[in-house]
Image (cartoon, rainbow, N blue to C red):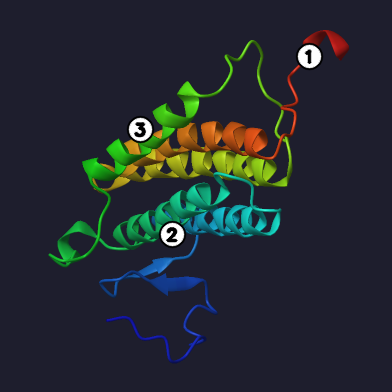
Amino acid sequence: MIRLNRIYTKAGDQGHTRLVGGQKVRKDSTRIDCFGTVDELSSILGLARTTLMLAGVPEGAKELAEVIRRIQNELFNLGSDLATLPADRHPKQPVIEERHVVALEIDLDRWNDSLPELRSFILPGGGMVAAYLHLARTVCRRAERCAVALAAEETIGEWSIPYLNRLSDTLFVMSRHASRLYGEAEPLWEPEKT
């Protein structure tokens, strides 16, 4: 049961915070950076989902919004796991598992199979929803780098890095799918025009 009665405690005013198990750590630690970046990613996905539902709701938009919401819930599971040392993990604490990675692969393959073949890199854009999903993709890559750095220092969940890796690929395909839903052109990299 989570209870958030007081939002501020002043305990962090000296640059420290506590992990789920109560351990006091610096706010610039790799672990804090890692789950903070996962939280940032979830917030950007919230922007994408909100924009998706405000932008006319074409056929397929509700399904995309539902997948984004599922991913946001999974990111909270991941953040919770990253905020907990393995020794302090509760047996019923939600964590990222192989099934979450497989679900991303299924979504990615289904959408990618319906998209035209790429012959160039895509410039982030292609409409508001697609642009937010591109932003989410880049933050996801940063979260993955943080998780790799954390895993070099401490033990993390077995599926954390594979999940973030697959999620960034999924977000790329989702951005292309969103452009198509809204009839937006995908801006392509044209190196000869630089």
Q: Amino acid at mark 1?
A: Glu
First-in-chain label (3 vs 2) = 2
x 34%, y 55%: residue: 78
| Rendered location of residue 94, percent (x, y) | 24, 61
Picture disc at residue 70: none
Q: Quadrant of residue 51?
A: bottom right
Q: Amino acid at mark 2?
A: Ile
Relative depth, front residue between 115 and 85: 115
Q: Quadrant of residue 165?
A: top left
| Rendered location of residue 2, percent (x, y) | 32, 81
Is residue 152 something that shows in the picture? Answer: no
Q: Is 108 rendered above or below residue 91?
A: above
**Residue located beneath label 3 in the image:** 105
**Residue located beneath label 1 in the image:** 190
Q: Amino acid at mark 3?
A: Glu
Are the two marked residues, 3 and 2, in contact with CB atoms closer than 8 angstroms?
Answer: no
Relative depth, front residue between 117 and 46: 117
Picture disc at residue 32: 2
Q: Secondary structure at mark 1?
A: loop
Q: Quadrant of residue 172?
A: top right
First-in-chain label (1 vs 2) = 2
